Amino acid sequence: MSGGLVIGDPWQMGVFMCGVAGIVSTSSPDPEQVRAMCRVIAHRGPDGEGYHVDDRAALGMRRLAIIDVAGGDQPVYNEDRTVAAVFNGEIYNFRELRAQLTARGHRFTTDGDTEVLVHLYEEYGEDLVGHLRGMFAFAVWDTARRRLLLARDRVGKKPLYYRQAGPSLAFASELKALMADPSVSREVDPVALHHYLTYQYVPAPWSIYRGVRKVPPGHLLVWEEGEARLRRYWKLDFTPRPVGSEEEAAEQVRQLVLDATRVRMVSERPLGAFLSGGIDSSAVVAAMARLSDRPVKTFCIGFDDPRYDERAYAASVARRYGTDHHEFVVAGSSALDVLPRVTRQFDEPFADSSSIPSFFVAELSRRHVTVVLNGDGGDECFGGYRRYAFMNRVGRIEPPSVLRGTLHRVGSALMRADARSRLRRVGRGMQVLAETPQRRYASLMAYFTSEAKDTLYTEEMHEQVAGVDSYELIRQVFNSSRADEDVNRLLDVDVNTYLPGDLLVKVDISTMAHSLEARSPFLDHHLMEWAAGLPGRWKVDGQVTKALLKKAMAPWLPSDLITRPKAGFGVPLAEWLRGELRPLAFDLLVDHTARSRGLFKPDVVRRLLKDHVEGRDRADQLWALLQFELWQRTCEDQSWDVTAATPGRAQECCG
């Protein structure tokens, strides 16, 4: 090991993972409503709370103290208290910013990172966001101008919801905080539901409620005198740039990963890492071990189904670096126990089934640490998904229009095979080829295709989403990308859709539900901007994904881990829905309550259930429908007894 982990140096970084909430209005907002909003998100910050109230604004926050534990209260103010801020996240370049601002005459009263926001605002106004390195969602209130500035980090690691009602605007870190106001309409947005069924998540700027929106990643919102405007301040640029040799690039990867990891390892609270057995989290653990003078605490989730269990690969990395390693096993019965808690925590329908192991590993890691590093973003930086290699082969193939119908029909027939069958993958490929090149990737990402939704919807639901094309969300990003290779265009698409809409939501909600902070070195914007300009062939070389990252990590990681196929963070969902979760699916999806919503045709839902039981895989579609119905009953009808669910029965195997 080299270097040495610096812990507890407040001049290096001040961190306050929190939940924020507030209301601004042309008339006096209700401070008690903001307090109620903050109580709802107390899990995001169990260590304290703070409020600012004046005749136009009420701001609140809940604090999870990581650095400057004793003195990091919020809100923070400038010297004359005309600018106030509440903040959720981390500013990794806090020390440099503080020195620059002090040299320009600003005076600081705390040792935390939040205070730089008010002074940066004084210097740069809205452009303050361009100076920040980190993850954040924050509000800055300018009492003199009666202006609110809301900002969300470049990639969307921290969430931020808002609702405008006449001359008032309310905001919060989680949707449930806004819904704490009984006057807010709980009407489901049919367009949001339409997109959810396609992609497993509700994409920004929509929320599942008609009247609430998300601040998209890389955007800021400015409210003044009852008017709000939203603008984008950052977009990852995939314009090609000159590069040296692959060997030089591999060395640069190692240095960037080390630097991004180093700035994320400062903490006064116990720190560890998620270790999945994949190359990304393993690379982060390897970097942590090089930077630390003590064993890194690592946490791995496993399954009793060996087809989905990656603990052996994680254990090999743990042995290589002598980590303090902990493993946990999730069974189908455990998933059933925790399902209502997971559903309630996510606030809106969310059908990525890996949220279950994510929830477990966060819950169990929190017994040992308060901060974890993870490998999120490695796939989007360096081309890790198998679908990139597939699209690299077929993306430009354009079959005659007369053959597309046949391709789609044959592909649909093959899709009835078992989830792990090669025939199913061939069928999916034929369905994708049946689409035009511009819509091909959207089709590949869809869980309910456009045709499947047409069959599923009632006439009323059809009317509400008439003319809305979910595939268009991906097509627009693909066509507007500055990349000149399809691989980099696909990365651009995922950075703007799947990464913030699915992966980062899953990690943020799962970890903050347990007052655990997650940090992602691969999502450092310096690393991302460097990687974006690399040639696509260095990322996906034929059938080899993450080619450059694998070359870079070869000196750090076991060879069998480098060469193994990507497995993903999947769960045995198809088996669970034929086993432990089968009664739940049948009970909830076709009973009177579900039918009465008037959204989906009951006979189509029954057919999906029947097909799945008989061996034709419908797990992804059933899971999306089940999560929507569970959300309705848990968060809306409140007819699901969450308190009766046990806290989970994950089995701690060692550590």
Image: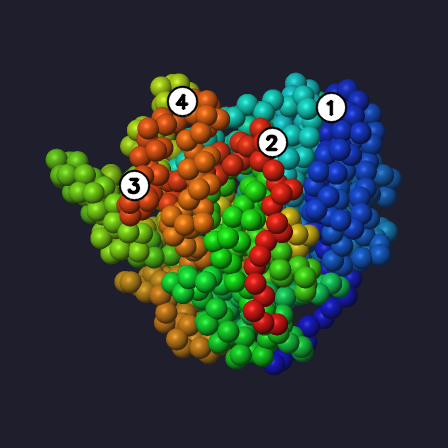
Q: Earlier in the sequence, mark 4 or mark 2?
A: 4
Q: How is the image coloured?
A: rainbow
The residues tagged by marks 3 and 1 sit, at their Cα atoms, a distance apart of 53 Å
Q: Which mark is residue 25?
A: 1
* Residue occupied by mark 2: 638
Q: Nearer the viewer, residue 18 or 344?
A: 344
Q: The disc labelled 3 sits on which kind of residue?
A: Asp
Q: Is residue 32 visible?
A: yes
Give the residue drawn at x 35%, y 19%. 459
Q: Earlier in the sequence, mark 1 or mark 2?
A: 1
* Residue occupied by mark 4: 461
Q: Residues within 10 Å of mark 4 (few under 14, many from 20)?
A: many
Q: For the residues carrying marks 1 and 2, which lies nearer the camera in this image?
A: 2
The quadrant of the rendering that contains the C terminus is bottom right
The residues tagged by marks 4 and 3 sit, at their Cα atoms, a distance apart of 24 Å
The answer to whether the residues at label 1 and label 2 have Cβ atoms under 8 Å apart is no
Q: Earlier in the sequence, mark 2 or mark 3?
A: 3
Q: For the residues carrying marks 3 and 1, which lies nearer the camera in this image?
A: 3
Q: Position of residue 185 (x, y in %)?
A: 60, 22
Q: Position of residue 478 (x, y in %)?
A: 37, 42
* Residue occupied by mark 3: 611
> What SS does tag 2 mark?
loop
